[in-house]
Amino acid sequence: MKLIADLKHTSLALALGTALALPVQGWAAEPEAEQQESVPALPLEELRMFAEVYGRIKDAYVEPVDDRELLQDAIRGMLAGLDPHSSYLEPDAFESLQVHTSGEFGGLGIEVGMEDGFVRVIAPIDDTPAQRAGIRAGDLIIKIDDTPMQGLGLNEAVEMMRGEIGSEIRLTIVRDGIEKPFEVKLVRDAIKVVSVKHKLLEPGYGYLRITQFQLNTAADLRKALANMGKEQPLKGLVLDLRNNPGGVLQAAVDVVDTFIDKGLVVYTEGRLPSSQLKFSATSETPAPNLPLVVLINGGSASASEIVAGALQDHHRAVLMGTDSFGKGSVQTVLPLGSDRGLKLTTARYFTPNGRSIQAQGIQPDLMVEEGRLTEVVHEDFIKERDLAGHLENAAVMQPVSNGDDGLAQRDFQLYQALNLLKALNIVSTGSQG
């Protein structure tokens, strides 16, 4: 019986061997002599095993299986075994990825990856159903509605989270620090991501948040800087990259170029010549000397880590917060025909000083955990002004502004960043005087 099975599927193994020897569409084939030297012999035993498994499934599975469906599943499994970010993009996923980089798409507004067979939240996107429902970076999604995630592919999970606008969905979450899984109900919405948000924390001190790196992010960032500096020049800026899942590489490079006027920003290394890239800053830099504090956390990934790492290596900013996510790999989308694609990890990112981000992340210069600052009630000490007959001060007392008194309660990390900017400004002013 075994011999019959082997003979029955020999043609399939030969066809697979021929297909595997062909170059991927769109990639230039190497000269024949170089291919013979660099490409190892095909593992015929494994190909024979694949053909045998294929045949056993066709012959013995409880229900008939379509050949196309079986081969599609094989492709998905082959890519899923590489790393959490490589995947096969079927028509809907391929179209969604292209729309996603332009800043408008449908769903929950959540960036996810695979970990141990479950869906891990990289970061919720601002002003989306996921963010409003309290989904956090690091959450593990173990069930969508009544469907367990164990064994499903990432694309299948993402497709399940998409749906008609206004429809409800239930996510079962496992979160560190909470003993039991819990359920979160969300309502799907049309997601339009605003890449750059800004405001003045206090006169002269700006806050700029990048939620995701899109094609227009750097241009929007420069407009925001100009708007905040209209009434008076900025004394300092907080650049908030917390829970930023990444995005377009060139956008990250252009953001760094806003703050440095020379030097390497990031480089990539991979096996293909096209993956050996270097990106450098230009001399046209709107804010080369603006004091800068960058906030990062465990939800800061990919492109946001490129920005943080470059500014840290150039000693251009003080990084504050907690360790970043550690996604230091480059994914290239390779079209397969007109409506499908392959998202394949092709390179690794390195900071200007040669640090690999992959599985390491960026460590902040100042570790500040997320928390809340509560006021401590002090005793009413007797002061000079309470003593009978004290001398009056001829100077008129001016009230001291502490800015937004509620900031420490709402966002302790941002509160600390603002205090650091003020200190940097005082030191800078003192050294100039």
Image: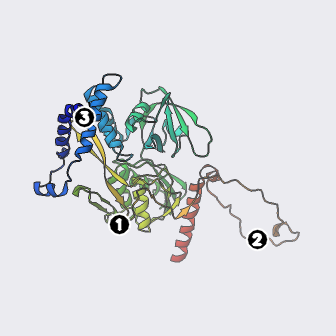
Mark 1 or mark 2, which has the lower sequence index?
Answer: 1
**Which amino acid does the dot numbered 1 rest on?**
Asp
Separation of marks 2 and 3 at Cα, in angstroms: 79 Å
Mark 3 or mark 1, which has the lower sequence index?
Answer: 1
Separation of marks 1 and 2 at Cα, in angstroms: 50 Å
Residue 339's disc is 3
The answer to whether residue 358 is above or below residue 181 is below
Q: Nearer the viewer, mark 3 or mark 1?
A: 3
**Which amino acid does the dot numbered 3 rest on?**
Asp
The quarter of the image holding the N terminus is top left
Say whether residue 360 is left or right of residue 393.
Answer: left
* Tag count: 3
The answer to whether residue 157 is above or below residue 275 is above
Q: Residue at 25% x, 28% y: name it.
A: 67
Q: Is mark 3 on a helix, strand or loop?
A: loop
Q: Mark 1 points at which residue?
A: 261
The answer to the question of whether label 3 and label 1 lie on touching residues, with beta carbons closer than 8 A, is no
Q: Mark 2 points at which residue?
A: 393
Q: Residue at 71% x, 66% y: name it.
A: 396
Q: Which of 81 and 386 is in front in this view?
A: 81
